[in-house]
Image: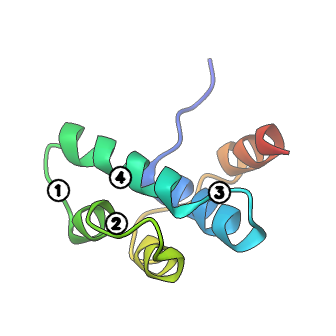
Amino acid sequence: METPANHRTMAEYFIRGITEGFVDAAEVIAWSDEIVVTAEKTEDWMLEISSASPDDRMGVLHHLHAVRGEIQPDVLARLLAARK
């Protein structure tokens, strides 16, 4: 069974995706919207991304850097490999 990605790992995946051009802001906003609905406690970055415009690529990228936690290197590598 594969380990699910935590929020920090997903944020790093999206950071790389936006900067490398294989993820658009709308995908990140949809991810954040889902988290806001299911999270026990919302955090500022979740709300900032959810309320961002899909045209504000740099703003979304900025808010992704605010996601705290530890990156799961193996999970991140799996996500990146699956995208290519």
Q: Which residue is mark 2?
A: 49
Distance of mark 2 from mark 3, alpha carbons? 14 Å
Horizontal side of 35 relative to 69 (left or right) equals left
**Crowd class of label 3 (few under 14; some 14 to 19; many from 20; radius 10 Å):** some
Horizontal side of 9 relative to 46 (left or right) equals right
Of circles 1 and 3, which is in front? 3
Of circles 3 and 4, which is in front? 3
Image marks 2 and 4: residues in contact by CB distance under 8 Å: yes
Q: Which residue is mark 1?
A: 42
- Residue 49: give x, y in percent of width and height: 34, 66
Distance of mark 2 from mark 1, alpha carbons? 12 Å
Name the N-terminal-most of marks 1 and 4. 4
Name the N-terminal-most of marks 2 and 1. 1
Determine which of the numbered discs, if any, sits on residue 32 in the image: 4
**Amino acid tagged 4:** Ser
**Amino acid tagged 1:** Thr
- Residue 22: give x, y in percent of width and height: 73, 57
